[in-house]
Image (tube, helix red, strand yellow):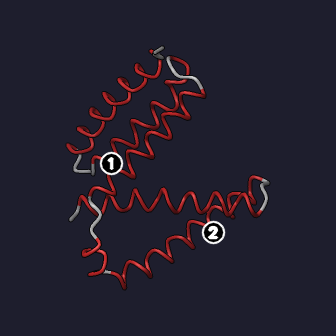
Amino acid sequence: MPHDVSIIATFAVGFVLAFIFAWIATRLRLPPLVGYLVAGVLIGRYAADMVATSQIAGQLADIGVILLMFGVGLHFSVADLMAVRRIVVVGAVVQIAIATGVGIVLAKYWGWTLGAGMILGLCLSVASTVVVLKGVEERN
C-alpha cells in the first residue's frame, strides 16, 4: 500500500503545534481550544508551502471535523440534554438564526447568491456550535 509522507508530516507538525499552543493558552488562563485554533491557523496558512497540497489540506480539514464531532459525541448525554432542554432549544434556534444571518450578509458582500449565503451560514452555525460546546464543556 503506498503511503503519502507529506500528509504524515503535516499531521506531525499539526499535533506538535497544537500541543505547544494549547500549553501556551493554558498558561495564559485561556481554554486549550484557543491554542488549537491558533495552531490550525498557522498550519493552514504556512504549511501549504512546506508539505501540504490543496488535496491534503481538504483531507486534513475533513479529519479535523470528524475528530471534533467524535469528541463531542463522546461527551454527549441525553439525560444532561433533557435537564436543560428549554435553554438549549431556544439557544440553538437563536444561534442558528444569527449564524445563518451572518453567512447571508457575508455572501451578499462577496457577491454570492442567497442560496450560497444560507449554506455558508448553516455551516457556520454547525461549526460554531461545536466550538461553543467545547468551551462550555471546559467550564463545566
Residue 106 sits in which quadrant?
Answer: bottom right
Q: Residue furthest bottom?
A: 86
Q: Residue furthest front?
A: 1
Residue under label 2, please give it. Answer: 101
Residue 27 sits in which quadrant?
Answer: top left
**Residue 110 point in image, percent of width and height:** 75, 52
The answer to whether 140 appears left or right of 82 in the picture is left
Q: Quadrant of the C terminus?
A: bottom left
Q: Is residue 70 above or below residue 6?
A: below
**Residue 94 point in image, percent of width and height:** 50, 77
Q: Kindly identify the residue that appears in the image at 52 percent across and 63 percent down.
A: 125
* Amino acid under disc 2: Gly
Q: Is residue 66 above or below residue 88?
A: above
Neighbor class of circle 2 (other Cα within 10 Å; few <14, some 14-19, many 20+) is some
Q: Kindly identify the residue that appears in the image at 49 percent across and 24 percent down.
A: 47
Q: Kindly identify the residue that appears in the image at 25 percent across and 38 percent down.
A: 24
**Residue 51 point in image, percent of width and height:** 50, 18
Residue under label 1, please give it. Answer: 33
Q: Nearer the viewer, residue 12 or 24?
A: 12
**Count of number-bearing discs:** 2
* Amino acid under disc 1: Leu
Q: Kindly identify the residue that appears in the image at 50 percent across and 41 percent down.
A: 62
Tell me whether the residue at label 2 lies in contact with that at label 1, contact meaning CB atoms closer than 8 angstroms.
no
Which numbered disc flags the more N-terminal residue, 2 or 1? 1
Mark 1 falls on what kind of element? helix
Give the alpha-carbon distance from disc 2 to disc 1, as whole Å. Answer: 25 Å
Neighbor class of circle 1 (other Cα within 10 Å; few <14, some 14-19, many 20+) is some
Q: Nearer the viewer, residue 18 or 63?
A: 63
